[in-house]
Image (cartoon, rainbow, N blue to C red):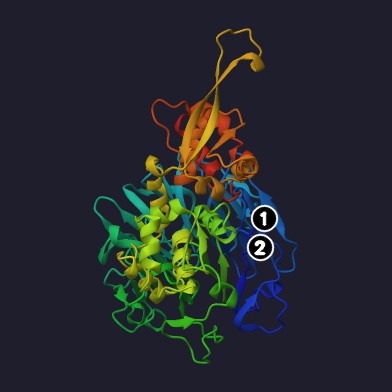
Amino acid sequence: MSNSSSLYLCRSNHDYNFLTRKKKNNLPKWTKSNLKKTQTIKKIVCGDRIHFLVWKKPNKLEFYQENKKKRKYQLPKNETIKDIVSSCQTYQILTESGKVWSLANENEYKEVPLLDADQSTFEKIRPVTFFEEKKLFVNSLIMGFGSGYYLCNGDQLYASGSNFDGRLGVGQNGGLVPMPVYVQDKVTKIFSGSVATNFFFITSKPDLLYGCGNNYYGQLGVGSTGNLSTATAVKNFKGSEILTVSSGHYHSILITNEGKVYSCGYWIINGHDFDKAIFTLIPQLKEKRAVQLAIGFKQNLVLTDQNELYGWEFNDSQLSTESNNLNKLPTKINLPGFFANYLKSKDLVRIACGSNVIFLYLDFKNTLLEDLRILFEHKKFCDCEIGKLGSKIPVHKSLLECRTKLTIDQIQNKLFGEKSTTNKEQTLIFLKWIYYDEISDLEKLEQTFNSLQLTFPPSVGNTLEKDIAQLYQDDDSKDFKILVKIKTDKEEDLEDDDKELNYEEIPVHKFILLARSGLFRAMFDYVNEKDNTNKVQDYTHKSIESLEILIKYLYTDSIELTTNQDPELIVDELSDAVEYYQLNDQCNFGSELLKIKKQFDLN
């Protein structure tokens, strides 16, 4: 499957003029980049003002730099990228195996813990061996300006790099810490920003948010100003209430789990003029539910669950707000047509800040959502219809019943009975929510929910994933069976062809196989040419144990073994599953297998 993930940028074109054909220094409107093949972008990370890194494939990266040919990098085949972060002229890559890799250019601040960091270039990705040598599994990492922070072995916090302003939280100011040092344990999450000279972290016991480092403008939200070299609790918030925090050079922004946006620090650029040393709710966004945050040196971007983009302190251009005034307060930014007409889902649209520029792109990492979107568009092997006579729309019965908890007859009667006013446009809006959680018209979707006597709005977040995972347990609604060969070798010396063959059946929902596996789609085509049977024979010669694991993954996007399952057999038989079963090549199946290998220490 391929999808166009068009990349747009806005504001200053001086630093990134190699991305567009526009000759003007400033881009007051969204401008599409001239990069080719921008499909399936997973993340964009901006370093210094003339280069950035793009993560596309599970272990592949692309580096773009002014006046330089695009560089491509590939990690070892057994490594799968989990995340990438950046600061200045340094990029760090975390893989699912808990290892850290670096891409750097003569580190002025030596953020990367390499013994010969001053000799690093952008020519190749290099492993950071420190953590392996110390037997530390890195769960997550972030970077501030000149510093790196690493959450290891579940809850142990390490830091390295510049300690100016006490930004490493080790109880002293100044100096360079070239190798990571232990900070504290019981840490659950870590936060900073690529230009930040401080950082935040959450602890489990006590349940608090802490900050340390540069606090000259009160940007740590601890109720006072002045730099802090040891962790100090942020006022008014428990750690469990926090979705994310990020810092610019003079300020910080915090988003709660409920999507409320707070800021503190230098009042001119924190979105309001309230007490600068305490995180304060931004009035202009109090009715919105924020789901993403991006901060540059001074610029701020917030994306809502309705794909509304707000920005402020962009003082060099209109930033698509149709105004020449400085945006000192959050202002809605018009999205380019490509995005406005695309999926309005917080799982797809991504924002990133570089120096004096912002990026907008699509991320298809939620492959379940993407697969079902494609199924909806192609309507492959639909098994029923809904709608009024003459304008009926083919659908997949199991999916509709799963998401509404109503029968297909109840849906048809309530939406299209004699007194119903539901039209085709409203039906399509409803079906987009059914198939891939899109809320493209809140008012019309609410009307449909009311007609069906369902609670509105649907629960917060991506309810589709939860619904499909629950559907795996619903054997009664499964409408298809996969036949798996079972060989009974009564005589050891018989040839394979002479061994007695039996079959076991794996029940499944047909639409799941149609949406997620190209191999099973081909099998369905063959079956439908022959007859209308509700069974298909699997010819892969995998064990039923492995196939059951694969089928469960198609519902849940995760692999979990029970005590009676053989991990070595599962890993061996499913190591080629993405290619063989033609799964979405952006899926996390490989990283899930890698977790099993690590859990059971398999080579």
Q: Residue beneath label 1, please?
A: 121
- 11 or 568: nearer the viewer: 568
Q: Position of residue 464 (x, y in %)?
A: 42, 56
Q: Position of residue 480 (x, y in %)?
A: 49, 40
- Which labelled disc corresponds to residue 372? none
Query: Residue 16 is drawn in which quadrant?
Result: bottom right
Q: Position of residue 82 (x, y in %)?
A: 52, 50
Report the label total: 2
Q: Position of residue 503 (x, y in %)?
A: 53, 25
- 543 or 297: nearer the viewer: 543
Instruction: State which tag comes first along the sequence, 1 or 2.
Output: 2
* The C terminus - image quarter: top right
In the image, residue 525 above or below residue 394: above
The residue most toward the bottom is 324
Q: In front: mark 1 or mark 2?
A: 2
Q: Is residue 558 left or right of residue 229?
A: right
Q: Can residue 269 be seen in the rendering of this structure?
A: yes
Q: Secondary structure at mark 2?
A: loop
Q: Residue beneath label 2, please?
A: 38
Q: Is residue 557 left or right of residue 49?
A: left
Q: Secondary structure at mark 1?
A: loop
Q: Can residue 160 be seen in the rendering of this structure?
A: no
* The N terminus - image quarter: bottom right
Q: Is residue 576 left or right of residue 295?
A: right
Number of residues whose C-alpha sits closer than 10 Å to that of mark 1, classed few (under 14), some (14–19) or many (20 or more):
some
Number of residues whose C-alpha sits closer than 10 Å to that of mark 2, classed few (under 14), some (14–19) or many (20 or more):
some
Amino acid on which disc 2 is placed: Thr
Amino acid on which disc 1 is placed: Thr
C-alpha distance separating marks 1 and 2: 25 Å
Give the residue displayed 36% in from the left and 78% down from the top. 285
